[in-house]
């Protein structure tokens, strides 16, 4: 699992990590049944307190994205069990997070729209096959 945190970002480290893992699960990059790294290991890898990572895992469990099985670790749940809501609700949540991040960064709405349009443009391009 590849995640990173930016301690200089105005977005709290907890929210950065939670959002990244949620996106990996919802997008299918973390398949159902995959075990998340142990709290201690992820905390050391990212230079965070174990309590922060534990809080992230707890939030993901409350959202129905993972199940914590004590010593057996934290496992990604299948989409039918995951509480991801509707696509429209998920999009609204993502838009709220983008708006909050833009405001925290001091970016005006026009610049935020331009950044989103550019990102959507990149995603809409066909993937180039390897080789």
Image: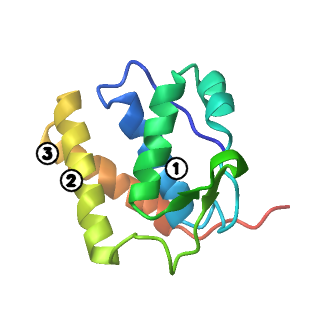
Crowding at dot 3, Cα within 10 Å, few <14 / some 14-19 / many 20+, comes out as: few
Report which residue position mark 2 lands on: 96
Mark 1 or 3 closer to N-term?
Answer: 1
- Mark 2 crowdedness (10 Å alpha carbons): few <14, some 14-19, many ≥20: few
Vertical comparison of 41 with 59: above or below:
above
Q: Earlier in the sequence, mark 3 or mark 2?
A: 2
Tell us which disc is closer to us: 1 or 2: 1
Asked if residue 129 can be seen in this view, the reply is yes
Which residue is found at the position 32% from the left and 67% from the top? 90
Question: SS for tag 3?
Answer: helix
Give residue 25's position: percent from left, percent from top.
Answer: 55, 61
State how many labels appear: 3
Q: Residue at x 23, y 29 (%)?
A: 105
| Residue 73, image x, y percentages | 67, 49
In the image, which disc is placed on residue 109?
Answer: 3
The alpha-carbon separation of the residues under discs 1 and 3 comes to 27 Å
- Observer-nearest residue: 1 or 126? 1
92 horizontally vs 11: left or right: left
The residue sitting at the right extreme is: 131
Q: Position of residue 7 (x, y in %)?
A: 42, 20
Q: Position of residue 72 (x, y in %)?
A: 71, 51
């Amino acid at each position: 699992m590849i995640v990173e945190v930016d301690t200089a970002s105005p977005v709290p480290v907890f929210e950065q990590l939670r959002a990244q893992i949620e996106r990996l699960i919802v997008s299918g990059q973390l398949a159902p049944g995959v075990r998340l790294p142990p709290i201690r290991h992820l905390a050391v890898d990212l230079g965070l307190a174990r309590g922060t990572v534990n809080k992230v895992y707890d939030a993901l469990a409350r959202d129905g994205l993972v199940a914590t099985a004590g010593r057996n670790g934290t496992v990604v749940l299948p989409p039918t069990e995951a509480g991801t809501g509707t696509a429209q609700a998920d999009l609204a949540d993502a838009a709220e997070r983008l708006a909050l991040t833009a405001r925290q960064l001091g970016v005006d709405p026009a610049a935020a729209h331009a950044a989103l349009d550019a990102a959507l443009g990149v995603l809409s391009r066909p993937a180039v096959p390897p080789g």
